[in-house]
Image (cartoon, grey):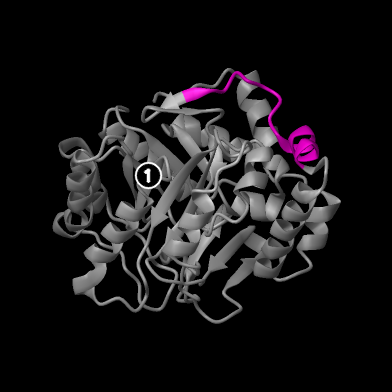
Amino acid sequence: MAMRRSLFQHILRIFPAEVAHNIRLGMLRFVGALPLGKWYLRRTLAPRTNSLEREVMGIHFQNPIGIAAGFDPNGDHLTELASTGFGFVEIGSVTPRPQPGTPRPRLSRIRKRNSLLNNSGAPNLGLEYVMRNVRRRNKFTRNLVIGCNIGKLTTTPPKNIVKEYLRVFRNMYQYVDFFVVNLSCNTAAKQFVPRTREEILSLIEPMFEFRRGQLDYRPILVKISPDMTQEELDIVVSILIETPLDGIEAVSGSTALANEERGAVCGAMLTERALEVVRYVAQRSDYNYPIIGSGGMMTPEDIERMFEAGASLVALSSGVRENGLKLLRRTTKRIASKNLTTRR
């Protein structure tokens, strides 16, 4: 079922997708900077129920719906997103050094399918910039759960990839609440999608080792591609069960749906596959591990189905880009009225 868009959302759709997203973030920051701006954001956008609080991965969430990586990659809008009532914000993908991404236009609409084609190459301003943002928490973001999605620089040779991931992990460890290791860096010409057990373990085992020496525990998840085969999904689930990995985020954009276009498809075209992957992972792991459901979450109905499939949390990106920030309030109202709970 299509979601009704506001007049502002219809106006934004006149502009190219990336321009529209930047306008939205600019307006969000402008409103948040007004004397009563943050109160206005809470009043008009934040959920009106407190019944959705839950604990996942040992972390307390005000509600189980958050923002996915790529929406606010540098953590520039944490205060405003906290004021709108999201349960968490996943920043990134964060790379050790600034990465400009691919030349514009790099985000385009597939209008007839209510979807986006992402060819961005994970642009971000790098570890040092992002670290400055997340360590400056204020009274509005003090209780906001922040996740860090770790990616790689497009130009990094294979022999240095593990060092890159570990550098971001170690430096961000004390400033965020959980980590997502991106196993689907697929929006640039040089894609990085590790699929074998050896490739995946080479990335996460050094993180487990570092974490064992820390006083505070930070959950580690991996984000997987919707284009994985059943055999490859089984490998990820076996790693989840057999190692200290804390959970899985499923899924990123799909290059298989891109019809030979460069980039990854997000949005409504991805919905059914995202639900299928989450359902399969949840069943194979006996619903014993946290799953963040993402990809194709465009309407309250989609998000409800994602929880029913076995997700513990849901991360939004394309749904907010195309249907507006009110998607959060509409969804929380729907799931609260149905007393919908998650397994973990």
Can you give x and y, in whole percent of width and height, for residue 195 in the image?
Answer: 24, 59
**How crowded is the residue under tag 1: few (<14 C-alpha within 10 Å), some, or many (20+)?**
some
Q: Amino acid at mark 1?
A: Gln
Q: Quadrant of the N terminus?
A: top right
219, 318: nearer the viewer: 219
Residue farthest toward the bottom in the current orientation of the protein:
103
Q: Which residue is mark 1?
A: 174
Q: Decide whether residue 242 is among the magenta residues.
A: no
Residue occupying image coordinates x 29% and y 60%: 167
Q: Secondary structure at mark 1?
A: loop
Side of 289 relative to 33 (left or right):
left
Residue occupying image coordinates x 38% and y 37%: 291
Residue occupying image coordinates x 31% and y 68%: 192
Side of 138 relative to 228 (left or right):
right
Q: Is residue 342 visible to the viewer in this orientation of the structure? A: no
Side of 3 relative to 108 (left or right):
right
Answer above or below: position of 111 versus 33: below
- Count of picture labels: 1
101, 237: nearer the viewer: 101
Q: Quadrant of the C terminus?
A: top left
Stretch of the chain drawn in magenta: 38-54
Can you give x and y, in whole percent of width and height, for residue 246 in the image?
Answer: 29, 37
Answer above or below: position of 8 versus 65: below
Side of 255 relative to 320 (left or right):
left
Can you give x and y, in whole percent of width and height, for residue 89 in the image?
Answer: 53, 45
Q: Quadrant of residue 200?
A: bottom left
Residue farthest toward the right in the current orientation of the protein:
7
Can you give x and y, in whole percent of width and height, for residue 217 in the image?
Answer: 30, 35
167, 322: nearer the viewer: 167
Q: Is residue 107 visible to the viewer in this orientation of the structure? A: yes
Residue occupying image coordinates x 50% and y 78%: 102
